[in-house]
Image (tube, rainbow, N blue to C red):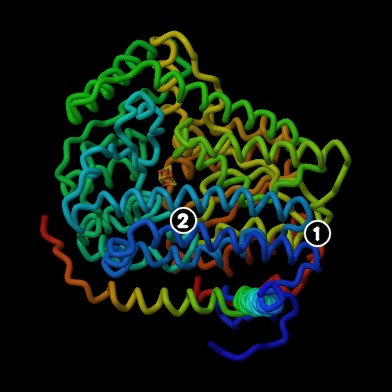
Amino acid sequence: MKKAIIPVCKLLGLLLGAAAIVFAAVQAVYWLNLDNKFMFLLHRILNKITDRVPRDRRF
Amino acid sequence: MSKKTDRGTRSRFYDGYELARYRKWRGFKDSWVDFREWLTEKKISGELIKADPVRAFKALTTYHWLAPYLGSGSMLDRTIDDAHGEALLIAHKYMQFLLKSNVDALVKIIRADERFGKNEYAKKMVIFEQDTSPILIGGFPNLTNAVEEPYFGILAAANDQHAGHYFTDIIDSYGLPSDSCRNSSIVCGVAIDDQLPYYGACLITSNAPCDSSVMNSSVVERRLKIPSIQGCTPMRWKDEDTREYAVAHVKEVIKFIEDCTGETFDWDAFFKTVRQYNEETRIQHELWELAKSPYYPVPSVPNLLYRSFQLSFSSGLNENCAKIGREMLAICEKCVREKINVRPKTRHRTLVCGAPASYYMHFSTWMYECWGVNTVAVLNNLSHHEYICEDDKEEALWGVAQLWEQAIMRRHLVGGYENMLELFEEYERFNCDMIVYYDNITCKGSKAITGMVQDIANERGIPLVWISHDLIDPRNIPRSEMRRQFNDFMSTVMNEEPLDASLLDFDDSKGW
Ligand code: SF4
């Protein structure tokens, strides 16, 4: 039983480690290149939406 | 966006935009610090959504002034572009503190906004106009303060240079004077366009003698429909005769808050806030001492923003303010003690006066990178620097009155010539060798004195450059024009060559 658990744990560890590395790499690429561009696009979209909200200018 | 061109340091950016195609490579160690701290900054920004996702979504799709905060990451990059080593770490820590404080403030406003449904917080909040320190709220532990104007104007434009157009155009089309300070125009525009959040038990306005209090208070009051009182303190605080009146008025404001909220002023809680305020002030005095040294590492923009925040927003109410101040102090002391030079491009040490352009907050960063002009002190930030009495009630209220009287801008922009001419003492104190004077073309108080300042500088042989700008609206004086004014001064008056010629002239007029 014990013998069977060890390789499973190792495999899980490896998978987790690989996932962490991929996650960190994706984050690094996002940080390096995409973050500000994505936010810029989102900002433009939000401006388009808020431009169309009806406003009451009488008070 | 157009494709990349070869433009030296600027080749990293899209033509016409202050938007980088990729991040600056700072070497392994500094890039790691940059990446690590960016992760923290993303986490902090995420709190705006996490706190109440539904309300946050509604706010983002309702308020035009909120979207520019998506640019905070880019703004942060721009303002710390000139930093490395200890300076980079300090800059990140300062900016994270500001980011966190701003996110917390916005979360508070969004959570209390009755536009998105009735709630228990709305009537627990007391709104303070930006020139009026919220320190008194320390005496009301069940209440919380909100300072909202900077979020509509100054801070929004710092994130996106075009953030204010929408609102200035509204006040122009409404028939209000178009030559008023943009600081007030924007807030008026927000009020007219019904974009003020609905919340608050009452409003404390300021009597700063400029457009900002005179014009926007009345419009904001009409829209908000909550009781308001003017934090009316004398301008001539050096005159002892004004003291009695000033203290009486602070008492009136306390009574007003009590009447509006049903709460009672708690002196013990108030003195606790005062002690915290004094601790923030003590740290600031020590930082100013270190700023006299050539090894002072704090880059100019975080320097400017942190102190403004401490005076106008925290005033002892934000525990993190002193905490971050102590951390920064330790790093600064180390740099000065061990003579670590993290500002190696410095050719000139400058004192900066006047209101900086919000749409070009990183002008100081550019001055350093292009010309080696290092901003070591900001006159506006040297406003109120006294300690407030920690045990006597009358004395403490006098301290509060002084804090209001000497608020940022009030002292050094519209506070009378005696205060404004303090710039020459501060120039000596911080061992500067030039002065950069931001000339906000709509700030009438400071404009009135320009001739006198120039005459004194000429007499004393102090190099002084005026940089005209329009505070929150780059359409009249764009960033490139501000750079041109400085370039002309450096090449003709100072007779110098730039450190990086690719930064002399470029187009960043379009985005962020
Ligand atoms: S820049 Fe001048 S006019 Fe504008 S708010 Fe400040 S002191 Fe008032």
Sooner in the amino-acid sequence: mark 1 or mark 2: 2
Q: Position of residue A11 (x, y in %)?
A: 68, 80
- Foreground label between 1 and 2: 2
Q: Where B385 falls versus B465 (above or below)?
A: above
Q: Position of residue B210 (x, y in %)?
A: 36, 40
Q: CA distance from mark 1 to mark 2?
A: 29 Å
Res. A6 visible in picture:
yes
Q: Chain of mark 1?
A: B
Determine which of the numbered discs, if any, sits on residue B400 in the image: none
Image quarter of residue B460: top right
Horizontal placement of B285 versus B314: left or right? right
Q: Position of residue B420 (x, y in %)?
A: 54, 33
Q: Amino acid at mark 1?
A: Asn
Q: Nearer the viewer, residue B220 or B180?
A: B220
Q: Where B283 falls versus B217 (above or below)?
A: above
Q: Position of residue B269 (x, y in %)?
A: 40, 21
Asked if ligand 1 lies within 8 A of label 2, the reply is: yes
Q: Residue at x 40, y 77 (%)?
A: A44
Q: Residue at x 21, y 44 (%)?
A: B120
Q: Residue at x 68, y 78 (%)?
A: A4
- Which residue extends farthest right? B338
Q: Which residue is mark 2?
A: B471
Circle 2 residues within 10 Å: few <14, some 14–19, many ≥20? many
Q: Chain of mark 2?
A: B
Q: Which residue is mark 1?
A: B495
Q: Nearer the viewer, residue B318 or B299?
A: B318
Q: Where B424 falls versus A28 (above or below)?
A: above
Q: Where B373 falls versus B283 (above or below)?
A: below
Q: Amino acid at mark 2?
A: Leu
